[in-house]
Image (spheres, rainbow, N blue to C red):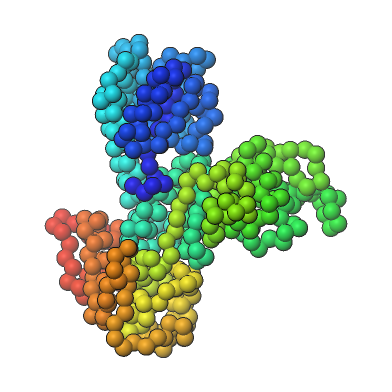
């Protein structure tokens, strides 16, 4: 699991000694632990903490564990919950299970007993997340189109998306321009419980500074010159759903303060109005800046940064996942030349593999669209690529592989990269060709052609679905 996807545990008990013990045991197995002294406080923390596991006492003041359990399940259906009780009985266990509890543990419990319970719950959380990840990878819905690749870094991103989609946790998506930050935000929204609710994307960098406040929060008739009628803001338009604040680092300090109040109080005040309006919005922020450095330098509010930075998804630059370039090339070929059989010459593919792609996936997309429009309609060659990619083709070039030394690549190795990538994906999906072509981002015809070309066989009993 990635650092941002560590198992999160919420411990709810009115006895400090029990909470301390559970926190210690949870930390000892590498989990992020948060505590709450009663059910009411725990419920207030759910949105911010978004726990994978909850340990709740049965007997608590005001709200019992059995009353608390269904409230959590309603808000976070995928969260696993165990009840702690000093009044253990078969009836209590059965009732807790019927309400959705994973298990129960009787106090006083031994450290090893609690550790084993937490580890079993974590394994189920990971298994459910992995299954959901695989289901999401083969879905044909449009929202994940464009997130193509089988590299470790992009699969880590998709696993995190699968874990976040049914939560309301604030998410910060960090990455260079063109890496697909909005695609990831849309995937989080449209894959989860809010899929039928509004999704509103706001490019904070393109808004006129003097009008940002009225655009975000709305305005009343007569609030300023030209305001001939009232208009709701983008937060109100996104009510019940998700708002993406793209390039949030471009907001002024004054707007950052107002945005922080909206996130804390869950209400907006339109420009020119004395009335505050309640809004229920999940916030996803995206940036190509280093917000951590910006807040340390006083250029971004520290309190807003920590409010947004509950979970951070780091999108890799295309040069950091060069093995995905062939799959992306074929994906864009299928998009811009549907129904046609276009190939890419080894020299052209070599150019694209050695190029650094400062504009990332967006630049590659534009490159393929240009090549399809200007090319011969049968093969993409070096002459069809933008001038920046037409570098000398003699000798070798290197493709960085993580933190290891650069690996020399020659023409014959380009096919090996593609063959290895397809082989790895086929093995991952146990020979399911329909699933493989979606993971690779290529058409059915392209996959069959590649399987035949590289003599890649399917395992016995593999699915022939396509």
Residue 196, compared with residue 450, is above or below; it is above
Apparent side of residue 97 relative to residue 249 in the rendered image (left or right): left
How many numbered discs? 0
Residue at 27% x, 72% y: name it: 407
Residue 396 versus residue 322: which sits nearer the camera?
396
Residue at 54% x, 29% y: name it: 44
Residue at 33% x, 29% y: name it: 25
Quarter of the picture holding the C terminus:
bottom left
Residue 248 versus residue 80: which sits nearer the camera?
248
Q: Residue furthest front?
A: 297
Q: Residue 301, how many percent across, how many down?
A: 62, 48
Q: Residue 445, how many percent across, how many down?
A: 30, 71
Q: Quadrant of residue 464?
A: bottom left
- Residue 196 visible in image: no
Q: Residue 210, how many percent across, how many down?
A: 76, 58
Residue 435, compared with residue 378, is above or below; it is above
- Residue 347 visible in image: yes
Q: Residue 181, how many percent across, how many down?
A: 50, 58
Residue 59 versus residue 432: which sits nearer the camera?
59
Residue 184, compared with residue 60, is above or below; it is below
Q: Quadrant of residue 351?
A: bottom left
Residue at 32% x, 41% y: name it: 126
Apparent side of residue 33 relative to residue 234 in the rendered image (left or right): left
């Amino acid at each position: 699991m990635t650092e941002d996807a560590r198992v999160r545990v919420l411990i709810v008990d009115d006895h400090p000694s029990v909470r301390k013990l559970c926190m210690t045991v949870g930390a000892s197995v590498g989990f992020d632990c948060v505590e709450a002294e009663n059910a009411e406080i725990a419920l207030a923390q759910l949105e911010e903490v978004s726990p994978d596991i909850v340990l709740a006492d049965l007997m608590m003041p005001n709200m019992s564990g059995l009353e608390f359990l269904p409230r959590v399940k309603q808000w976070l259906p995928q969260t696993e919950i165990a009840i702690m009780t000093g009044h253990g009985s078969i009836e209590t266990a059965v009732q807790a299970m019927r309400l959705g509890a994973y298990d129960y543990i009787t106090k006083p419990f031994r450290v090893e007993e609690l550790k084993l319970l937490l580890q079993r719950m974590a394994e189920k959380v990971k298994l459910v997340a992995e299954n959901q990840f695989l289901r999401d990878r083969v879905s044909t819905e449009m929202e994940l189109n464009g997130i193509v690749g089988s590299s470790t870094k992009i699969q880590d991103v998709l696993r995190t998306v699968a874990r976040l989609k049914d939560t309301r946790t604030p998410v910060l998506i960090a990455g260079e321009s063109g890496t697909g930050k909005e695609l990831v935000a849309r995937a989080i929204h449209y894959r989860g419980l809010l899929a039928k609710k509004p999704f509103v994307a706001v490019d904070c960098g393109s808004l006129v500074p003097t009008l940002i406040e009225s655009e975000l929060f709305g305005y009343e008739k007569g609030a300023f010159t030209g305001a001939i009628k009232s208009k709701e803001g983008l937060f109100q338009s996104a009510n019940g759903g998700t708002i993406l604040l793209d390039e949030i680092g471009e907001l002024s300090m004054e707007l950052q303060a107002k945005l922080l109040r909206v996130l804390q109080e869950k209400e907006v005040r339109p420009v020119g109005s004395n009335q505050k309006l309640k809004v229920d919005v999940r916030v996803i922020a995206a940036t190509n800046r280093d917000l951590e450095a910006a807040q340390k330098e006083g250029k971004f509010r520290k309190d807003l940064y920590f409010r947004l930075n509950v979970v951070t998804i780091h999108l890799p630059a295309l040069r950091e996942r060069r093995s995905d370039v062939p799959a992306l090339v074929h994906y864009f070929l299928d998009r811009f030349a549907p129904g046609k059989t276009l190939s890419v010459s080894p020299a052209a593919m070599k150019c694209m593999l050695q190029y650094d792609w400062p504009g990332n996936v967006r630049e590659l997309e534009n490159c393929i669209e240009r090549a399809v429009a200007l090319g011969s309609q049968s093969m993409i060659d070096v002459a069809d690529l933008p001038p920046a990619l037409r570098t000398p083709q003699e000798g070798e070039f290197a493709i960085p592989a993580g933190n290891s030394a650069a690996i020399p690549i020659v023409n014959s190795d380009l096919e090996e990269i593609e063959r290895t990538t397809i082989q790895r994906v086929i093995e991952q999906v146990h020979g399911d060709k329909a699933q493989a072509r979606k993971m690779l981002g290529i058409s059915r015809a392209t996959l069959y052609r590649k399987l035949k070309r590289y003599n890649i066989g399917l395992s016995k009993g593999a699915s022939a679905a396509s």
